[in-house]
Amino acid sequence: MVCPSLAASSIRRIAINLTTAEFSDERVAEALTAFKNEQGGPDELTIEATDVPDTLTMRQITAIYRAVVSG
C-alpha cells in the first residue's frame, strides 16, 4: 500500500491526508502502522482525516493508530 519511493525516502517526518473512507478502513490503518513500525520507517507519521467519522468508528480506528505509540 505504501509507495516504495516513500518507504525508501530519507524524509523522517511524514503527514498523510486521508478521506473519511480511507481513515475508517482498518486495512489502511494497519498498513500505515506497519509502515511506521518498519525498520527505517519514519520518525513521525501524522495522519490527518479530511472529515471526522462517527464516534464508534473513530474509537475503533484510533485504537489501531495508538498501538504504534504504545507498542
Image (cartoon, rainbow, N blue to C red):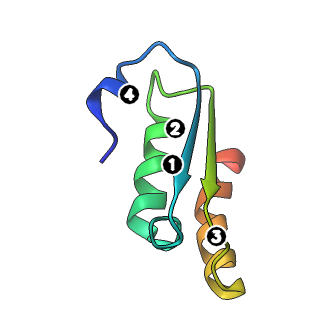
Amino acid type indicated by mark 3: Asp
Residue at x 52%, y 65% (from the top left corner) = 23
Which residue is disc 4 drawn over? 6
- Gap in angstroms between the C-alphas marked 4 and 3: 24 Å
Question: Up-down: is 42 above or below 62?
Answer: above
- Gap in angstroms between the C-alphas marked 3 and 1: 20 Å
Mark 4 or mark 1, which is nearer to you? 4
Mark 2 or mark 3, which is nearer to you? 3
Question: Which of the two labelled residues, at mark 4 and mark 2, occupies the earlier sequence position?
Answer: 4
Question: Up-down: is 15 above or below 47?
Answer: above
- Identify the element where label 4 is drawn: helix
Q: Position of residue 30 (x, y in %)?
A: 45, 58
Q: Outermost residue, front direction? A: 50
Q: Residues within 10 Å of mark 4 (few under 14, many from 20)?
A: few
Is residue 53 shown left or right of residue 42?
right
Is residue 14 shown left or right of residue 32?
right
Which residue is disc 3 drawn over? 51
Q: Say whether marks 4 and 1 touch (CB < 8 Å).
A: no
Amino acid type indicated by mark 4: Leu
